[in-house]
Image (cartoon, rainbow, N blue to C red):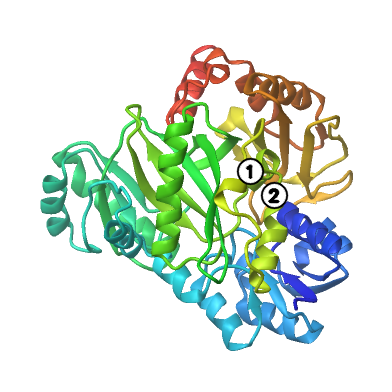
């Protein structure tokens, strides 16, 4: 039985996990860098251990320090949250070797699904719809060009071991291909230490739809409906919602079955996300699987009533899923906005600094997942997201109105944030009508620039 969990993360996700553990009667250990000595997660956990200097590579990515902190404090499990080491198969394998419960899938599953070429072939073999693409990893640009011609332009070049939008380029024509491939390959080498690439047909103007799944250790797999993550910039999500305005019951059933099939084909365990690209004709294609909890998990929690962090812990502790697929009901509508310390007027430049004063909204159907407080320092060393604002209402129209109201109440002084930008999106008729794809924010930013 899990009695003490070390949280190998920081910020709002660390606090989210601490709160779930406290409600379950489980002790928590926070780890922190020297820059995070006064961070909220270090104050809320039962214990806190410094694991290194400010730079992530010396602290939150330092596997040896995190394992040492786990052993020293007597924690019997690690929750990796998202980002950092959450999808690092080597770290999961290290936990296994040290007999520490890793709250997530097994290391071999992470490795298999983290390799996009292998993950794609797994889905092909299982009969899950995939985008036409290459069957192997590529390093030679001339060989890649010949395969690109077979696939058909436009094509997207992706890093095999990539993520977060790094190591990706689109080539619309044969003439553009060589430069796109070499640029993506160089970026992949710098970001991931690997120059293996793979190619896919580029699906233009799709929606980004992902399905939350839960899988126990006994082969039981269910999905918890979809999230629409199409409002994104540079492949980074900005606004997420559940359910999607583009998905009806029939499509939800088809995509949900494909998501469960994908998870079963991978032998998956714990919480995960199957990501799809959805075209206007309702065709959909497997894109990738995220082997961790997602930033946007609260919208699913609100429309299903299921606490995903607690579910993760219980699965890792050997419990069977207590829900069958027919038990899952999607009720109401939830929207999440990511509040970042950045300046939209200056190409979203990060804006770290000290928060001098703040007020966060409340009321029925308003949830705040945050790690900030008045007087805290927003560090320049980590991701710029400082707060997640999530709302729930009976309908999408009501949820948008509630989010608009809540954003209008937020006060964060001392630093620049994207709150006004999010507020403006809620006012846009195209967003309100659900008329958007993954290219939506590019259009919005162009219009804003023209109206200056």
Q: Quadrant of the C terminus?
A: top right
Q: Is residue 210 left or right of residue 9?
A: left
Query: Residue 132 location in percent, x, y?
Result: 23, 47
Q: Where residue 202 sits in the image (x, y, percent)?
A: 28, 40
- Report the front residue among 403 and 382: 403
Q: Are marks 2 and 1 in contact (CB under 8 Å)?
A: yes
Looking at the rendered structure, the number of numbered marks drawn on it comes to: 2
Q: Residue at the location (62% across, 40% down)?
A: 329
Residue 221 lies left or right of residue 404; in this view the side is left
* Residue 208: assigned label: none
Give x and y (percent) for residue 356.
Answer: 87, 40
The secondary structure type at the circle numbered 2 is loop
Left or right: 46, with 17 as reference point: right
The residue sitting at 64% across, 71% down in the picture is 316
Disc 2 crowd rating (10 Å Cα; few below 14, some 14-19, many 20+) is some
Q: Is residue 337 above or below residue 269?
A: above
Q: For this rendering, which residue is in front, 63 or 86?
A: 86
Residue at 63%, 23% in the rendered image: 396
**Which of the 4 quarters of the picture holds residue 57?**
bottom right
Kindly identify which residue carries mark 1: 300
Residue identifier under label 2: 306
- Crowding at mark 1 (Cα within 10 Å: few <14, some 14-19, many 20+): many
């Amino acid at each position: 039985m899990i009695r003490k969990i070390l949280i190998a993360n920081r910020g709002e996700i660390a606090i989210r996990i601490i709160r779930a553990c406290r409600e379950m009667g489980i002790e928590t250990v926070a780890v922190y860098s020297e820059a995070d000595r006064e961070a909220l997660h270090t104050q809320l956990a039962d214990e806190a251990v410094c694991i290194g200097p400010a730079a992530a590579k010396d602290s939150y990515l330092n596997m040896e320090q995190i394992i040492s902190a786990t052993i020293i404090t007597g924690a019997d499990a690690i929750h990796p949250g998202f980002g950092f080491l959450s999808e690092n198969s080597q770290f999961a394998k290290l936990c296994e070797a040290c007999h520490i419960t890793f709250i997530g899938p097994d290391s071999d599953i992470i490795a298999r699904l983290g390799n996009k070429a292998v993950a794609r072939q797994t889905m092909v073999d299982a009969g899950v719809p995939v985008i036409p693409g290459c069957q192997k990893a590529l390093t030679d640009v001339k060989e890649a060009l010949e395969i690109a011609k077979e696939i058909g332009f436009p094509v997207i070049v992706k890093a095999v071991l990539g993520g977060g939008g790094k190591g990706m380029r689109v080539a619309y024509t044969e003439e553009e291909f060589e430069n796109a491939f070499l640029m993506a390959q160089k970026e992949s080498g710098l970001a991931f230490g690997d120059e293996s690439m793979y190619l896919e047909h580029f699906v233009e103007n799709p929606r980004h739809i992902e399905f939350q799944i839960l899988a126990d250790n006994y082969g039981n797999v269910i999905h918890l409906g979809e999230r629409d993550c199409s409002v994104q910039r540079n492949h980074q999500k900005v606004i997420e919602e559940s359910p999607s305005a583009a998905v009806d019951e029939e499509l939800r059933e088809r995509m949900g079955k494909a998501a469960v099939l994908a998870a079963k084909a991978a032998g998956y365990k714990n919480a995960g996300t199957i990501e799809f690209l959805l075209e206007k004709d309702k065709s959909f294609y497997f894109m990738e699987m995220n082997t961790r909890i997602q930033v946007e998990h609260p919208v699913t929690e609100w429309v299903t009533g299921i606490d995903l962090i607690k579910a993760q812990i219980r699965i890792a502790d050997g419990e069977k899923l207590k829900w069958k697929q027919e038990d899952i009901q999607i009720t109401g509508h939830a929207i999440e906005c990511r509040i970042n310390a950045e300046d939209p007027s200056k190409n979203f430049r990060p804006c770290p600094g000290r928060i001098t004063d703040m007020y966060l909204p409340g009321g029925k159907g308003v949830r705040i997942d945050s790690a900030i407080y008045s007087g805290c320092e927003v560090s320049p060393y980590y991701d710029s997201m400082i707060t997640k604002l999530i709302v729930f209402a009976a309908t999408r129209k009501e949820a948008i109105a509630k989010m608009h109201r809540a954003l209008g109440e937020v006060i964060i002084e001392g630093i620049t944030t994207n709150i006004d930008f999010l507020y403006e999106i809620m006012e846009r008729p195209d967003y309100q009508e659900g008329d958007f794809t993954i290219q939506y924010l590019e259009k919005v930013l162009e219009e804003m620039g023209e109206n200056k």
